[in-house]
Amino acid sequence: MNPLRESKLIETRRHFFGRAAGGIGTAALASLLNENASATTSAGDTKKQAGGIPGVPHFPAKAKRVIYLFMSGAPSQLDMWDYKPKMNDWYDKDLPDSIRNGQRITTMTSGQKRFPIAPSTFKFSQHGKEGVWISELLPHTAKVVDDLAVIKTVNTEAINHDPAITYIQTGSQLPGRPSTGAWLSYGLGSMNENLPCFVVLHSTVNGGFGGQALYARLWGAGFLSTRHQGVSLRSTGDPVLYLSNPEGMSEGMRRRMLDELANLNRHRYEEVGDPEIQSRIAQYEMAYRMQTSVPELADISDEPQHVLDMYGPEVKTPGTFAANCLLARRMAERGVRFTQVFIRQWDQHGNLPNDIRRQCGIIDQPCAGLLNDLKQRGMLDDTLVIWGGEFGRTIYCQGGLTKTNYGRDHHPRCYTKWMAGGGVKPGIVYGETDDFSYNVIDKPVHIHDLNATMLHCLGINHEQLTYRHQGRDFRLTDVHGKVVHDLLA
């Protein structure tokens, strides 16, 4: 059989719709597949970004971009943000059954005979105009607390790391959904031509990573086009593999090679109509433009010393959290829509006082430096910064308990995150937990609510940013979530 004829005979349903969308029935088919595709551009949206879908943003946005500082492993809210002085009188006493109330716990502590209370060993003091209680672990962050909206009542159903991180990143505990950055790339499109819309940075701790593994699906595109997935920059060496031309390859030669490759891909697309071919062409072009833009991005030699000093002594060491926070600001300047900065090793089941002191020492000054840097450039107003992990830690101790040492298990019922800039009300504390930081007693914020509020800051109605897949409309907030308007400026 003729190979070309054979390829046309094995046309898939996906190929069929891809080809039909380019033919005479474009408008009708687009309307059937995606109602948003035929929506008119929202009022005030006079300049459409590259890509995105018509009608998005749905209303004027306060934030243009997001920097998400993700503390993978779950930092202890009890030792950083959620001050519980009454727990000092409960040292080594059992957690009351009335507080736990039969709630699910992990297998790591379910076999313990006791659940002894472990008060925080760290001192808390009040900071800012509202007198926000902050641990001694965060002296630099305490100085910028008037820029923060501290949310003490974030909660989730997930109790183990991988489903919990997958949940908050994609809206589902099960793998396969698009990540937050992919949704923003799909809905809003890119603000720049030479860098990806969505970039991921991984921070080293003492030269390595450690902690819970992070999988590429956490910044993947799921069932969206692969052009929306995050680009993960390397922490050491060239930020992107094969960014430099190999020996003997000139820039002009590479340009001619990509042009010919694009012609071949376009010819193939005309034959089979697979939309992923178009994504591949776009990715090759982006890779070419990144050859000049990424080295310039990563070269911080033009940064004044007073700016470097904001981020702390590790800022010149590639791959550190401090260096990545500075890169996140540089990406924000260059129009990257969504930057995710990961740092691991927050999973402190034992030896928590020593380990959390180390971790806070790594992240405290860079977080404050990032906010101050954005603020001095007039960028904090339209840049939304989010800090936090996948769940919190228990008031009761895992393993042995002493006055100076303890561990804490996973706790999804309540934990603390903060947001700043980009339409968020500054200098507030939202919500309240019980004396044991175990249950929410006022103003709960589910992770779907958090994502809905983030999208709202970007001018997106979270119920309307959808994608039809396998017969239903999917969205980042699944079928849940409400905007927490009290958090908005």
Image (tube, rainbow, N blue to C red):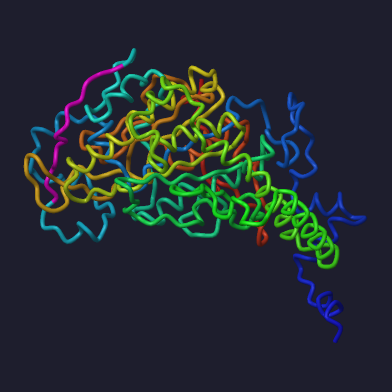
Question: Whole-percent x and y of residue 1?
Answer: 85, 87
Furthest residue toward right? 24
Furthest residue toward front? 248
Furthest residue toward top? 129
Decide if residue 108 is in sight here: yes
Residue drawn at x 24%, y 50% is 409
Horizontal relation, residue 34 to residue 242: left or right: right
Membership of 124 in magenta stretch: yes
Horizontal relation, residue 275 to residue 456: left or right: right
Reply above or below: 27 against 439: below
Residue drawn at x 38%, y 26% is 368
Membership of 177 in magenta stretch: no
Decide if residue 16 is in sight here: no
Residue drawn at x 35%, y 45% is 391
Quarter of the image for residue 253 reads: bottom right
Residue drawn at x 23%, y 47% is 100
Which is more toward the observer, 165 or 274? 274
Question: Whole-percent x and y of residue 324?
Answer: 44, 38
Reply above or below: 395 against 48: below
Question: Whole-percent x and y of residue 3?
Answer: 83, 80
Which residues fall within the magenta stretch? Answer: 115-127
Which is more toward the observer, 255 or 39? 255
Main SS, magenta region, reads loop
Horizontal relation, residue 476 to residue 154: left or right: right
Question: Whole-percent x and y of residue 60?
Answer: 66, 25
